[in-house]
């Protein structure tokens, strides 16, 4: 049954849509049902899906995608400042501008491949970051970050009194309906549903790309670019298109970030942020459809949980241990939670790359294969991928 | 003329750090073919060796004074570092020169860290794609950085240079210009000499010893050297350790210039990678030359005259040069033809 589902696009889309739209209900028992976190799931999901189009399909490892995220954020905030507090022009402009940047950066970077490509994209991203901090302060507001003020000249909807909030079709992004479902407190938030709809559309586009001849060409680039070149195919336009698409996804994610919280800072462009999206994609499963969304959700969820735990919570947790032992355990575990969440993240990153390069999706597949394999370990009947 | 000379001098200290880190990076790439994103973390660990040594040396013995009283009438505490207590004046000198003393700690420690890292992790990644090497070492860099952060805290810890080497030197007078025109912090000059010494030592080691000759042969053709019955893996492991030592020493001596904090490694890593690419992947002289070159270029770009024409150029000059080099001459300034050109 799983096999069938995996190859049926309609079923995948339906399942995905249902999962995302019911997110507030499904995730409520895990303590992740509140809007802020759900929005982050959706936004980073979009970011990772876009990154996967480049890295998963063509194999080009970009270490500078956070730059597009930052550019998208700045553009969206500027649109709030100058045009209107409606999110629709903001994200359209964010996507267009980051696409433009991606075109320029990709045109230069894609002249090289492998590690040179990684370093070129890294160099461009660091350039954007450094400039945003120093010379471009009039545009980016430097370290303070760009904010929406009530005195800004919004030419489309004019100056409003009080601090303006981003809205879509008259609904403010922070509006939330609280309900209860099976005794749980469930929150339906406009911002989340806006992000969720965009995530579903983004996922659908990514699915179409995966299944299209264009996607096949991208996969061919990953498998053997030299051979493609020998057959007389110019691969660069294809790779560039993939780069621009994934840059636009990143810009979209950045724009949405600004929509849910109208603030943009340069630290979003730092190269550790680029590393984070690489991690999400790898953790979920490079080159798989659902993997990046899973990875993004996984990391954001555990980031949220782990950074909240502190030593007191830990010792409450381990109440059953004797005093001396507990202190030791709390001390050791305390290094991994709270402030030390990045340590856990780094370790997780290494473990995944070392033992499970295919990510969570490969892990699931292995588990499923383990159970569905006939008893007696008959190798001949095990599924062998066709070469 | 003296303005130009001053900028060159200003670029030397950063250039030395770039050159030392890039030398280690390119040594690792040339021998093992591994792209090591954790090399900046090694630089940082070196810097924290100096911090640890300084802390160890200044551990104090607290005794109650018999004659002196505090304003509250209790006996005053006399704090003497153990090291002075044990060795007298020699101890004071040791404490004074703690940065130099920590080299003694850094060399064996970095060697162990390097060898453990190579045997424990990097070894398993020789055959895997460069992307995975980048990713796993990136993860390792995060882990090392966070361990240091949880141990030493997130704030920079200033390290004093020895008193005798702390002042300024009148470089102009020394070179025959008018006195007082080119004044340069003495420690930075020491750092440059130190870096030059280390670079020279590494080159001599590779050029004039049998061990170095075998390593060079292994860099050129690993298989043949292996077929000749030489255990090249063991030597390459040692070279990884050596690269770690070089990065660590660069970090130790850099502490009086910039107070070490946990993310200094990451800051330097990106730039050092750029330096390696500009110099040419796997080319040792290229890495050193490009390190100094980019350090000096950066210091020229931060001159006010230049900044007025191109605002912000000092922030991005290195990246601009790197982009130009990768596009126009992908093998780098001194790279061998055909090595990682695409």
Image: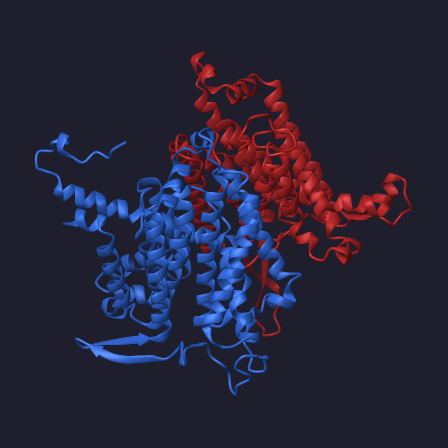
Chain colours: A blue, B red
Residue lying at the far left in this picture: please name it.
Answer: A375
Q: Residue at x 47, y 67 (%)?
A: A91
Pick the front one: A36 or B22? A36
User: Percent position (x, y) of residue A129?
Assistant: 58, 57
| Residue A223, image quadrant | top left
Pick the front one: A82 or A291? A82
Q: Residue at x 59, y 48 (%)?
A: B85
User: Percent position (x, y) of residue B51?
Assistant: 56, 49
Number of callouts in the render?
0
| Residue B272, image quadrant | top right
Q: Is residue A156 above or below residue A49?
A: below
Pick the front one: B312 or B71? B312
User: Percent position (x, y) of residue B76?
Assistant: 59, 65
Q: Image quadrant for the N terminus of chain B?
A: top right
User: Percent position (x, y) of residue B232?
Assistant: 46, 20
The answer to whether any part of residue B57 appears in the image is no
The answer to whether any part of residue B283 appears in the image is yes
Indicate left or right for B236 with B174 as reference.
left
């Amino acid at each position: 049954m799983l096999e069938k589902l995996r190859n049926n696009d309609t079923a995948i889309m339906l399942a995905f849509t249902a999962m995302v739209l019911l997110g507030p209900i499904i995730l409520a028992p895990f303590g992740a049902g509140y809007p802020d976190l759900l929005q982050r799931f959706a936004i980073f999901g979009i970011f990772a899906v876009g990154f996967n189009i480049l890295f998963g399909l063509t194999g080009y490892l970009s270490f500078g995608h956070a730059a597009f995220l930052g550019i998208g954020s700045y553009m969206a905030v500027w649109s709030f400042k100058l045009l209107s507090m409606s999110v629709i022009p903001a994200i359209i402009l964010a996507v267009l501008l980051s696409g433009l940047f991606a075109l320029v950066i990709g045109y230069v970077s894609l002249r090289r491949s492998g590690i040179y490509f990684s370093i070129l994209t890294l160099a461009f991203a660091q350039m954007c970051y450094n400039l945003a901090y120093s010379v471009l302060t009039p545009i980016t507001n430097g370290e303070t970050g760009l904010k929406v003020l009530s005195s800004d000249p919004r030419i489309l909807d004019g100056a409003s009194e009080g601090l303006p909030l981003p809205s879509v079709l008259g609904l403010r992004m922070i509006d939330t309906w609280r309900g209860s479902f099976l005794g749980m407190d469930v929150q339906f938030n406009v911002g989340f549903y806006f992000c969720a709809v965009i995530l579903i559309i983004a996922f659908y586009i990514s699915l179409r790309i995966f299944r299209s001849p264009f996607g096949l060409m991208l996969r061919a680039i990953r498998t053997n670019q030299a051979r493609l070149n020998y057959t007389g195919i110019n691969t660069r336009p294809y790779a560039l298109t993939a780069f621009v698409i994934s840059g636009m996804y990143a810009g979209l994610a950045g724009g949405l970030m600004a929509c849910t919280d109208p603030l943009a800072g340069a630290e979003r462009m730092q190269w550790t942020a680029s590393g984070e999206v690489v991690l999400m994609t790898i953790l979920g499963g490079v080159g798989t459809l659902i993997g990046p969304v899973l990875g993004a959700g996984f990391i954001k969820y555990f980031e949220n949980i782990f950074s909240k735990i502190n030593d007191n919570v830990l010792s409450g947790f381990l109440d059953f241990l004797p005093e001396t032992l507990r202190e030791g355990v709390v001390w050791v575990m305390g290094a991994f939670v709270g402030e030390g969440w990045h340590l856990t993240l780094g370790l997780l990153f290494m473990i995944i790359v070392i033992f499970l390069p295919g990510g969570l999706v490969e892990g699931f597949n292995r588990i499923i294969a383990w159970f569905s394999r006939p008893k007696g370990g008959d190798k001949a009947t095990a599924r062998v991928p066709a070469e | 003329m003296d303005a130009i000379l001053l900028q060159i001098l200003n670029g030397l200290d950063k250039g030395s750090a770039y050159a030392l880190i890039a030398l280690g990076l390119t040594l690792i790439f040339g021998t093992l073919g591994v792209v090591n994103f954790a090399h900046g973390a090694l630089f940082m660990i070196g810097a924290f060796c100096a911090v640890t040594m300084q802390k160890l040396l200044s551990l104090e013995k607290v005794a109650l004074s018999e004659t002196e009283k505090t304003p509250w009438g209790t006996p005053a505490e006399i704090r003497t570092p153990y090291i002075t207590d044990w060795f007298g004046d020699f101890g004071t000198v040791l404490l004074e020169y703690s940065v130099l003393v920590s080299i003694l700690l850094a060399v064996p420690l970095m060697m162990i860290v390097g060898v453990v890292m190579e045997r424990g992790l990097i070894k398993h990644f020789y055959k895997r794609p460069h992307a995975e090497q980048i990713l796993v070492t990136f993860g390792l860099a995060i882990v090392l950085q966070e361990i240091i952060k949880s141990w030493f805290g997130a704030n920079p810890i200033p390290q004093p240079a020895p008193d005798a080497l702390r002042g300024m030197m009148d470089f102009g007078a020394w070179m025959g210009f008018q006195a007082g025109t080119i004044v340069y912090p003495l420690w930075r000059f020491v750092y440059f000499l130190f870096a030059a010494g280390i670079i020279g030592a590494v080159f001599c080691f590779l050029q004039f010893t049998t061990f170095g000759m075998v390593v060079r042969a292994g860099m050129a053709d690993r298989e043949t050297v292996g077929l000749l019955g030489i255990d090249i893996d063991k030597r390459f492991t040692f070279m990884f350790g050596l690269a770690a030592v070089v990065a660590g020493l660069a970090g130790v001596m850099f502490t009086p210039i910039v107070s070490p904090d946990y993310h200094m490694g990451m800051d330097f890593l990106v730039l050092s990678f750029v330096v390696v690419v500009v110099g040419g992947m796997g080319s040792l002289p290229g890495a050193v030359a490009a390190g100094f070159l980019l350090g000096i270029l950066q210091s020229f770009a931060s001159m006010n005259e230049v900044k007025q024409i191109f605002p912000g150029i000092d922030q991005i000059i290195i990246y601009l040069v790197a982009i130009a080099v990768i596009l126009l001459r992908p093998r780098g300034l001194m790279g061998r033809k055909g090595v990682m050109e695409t």
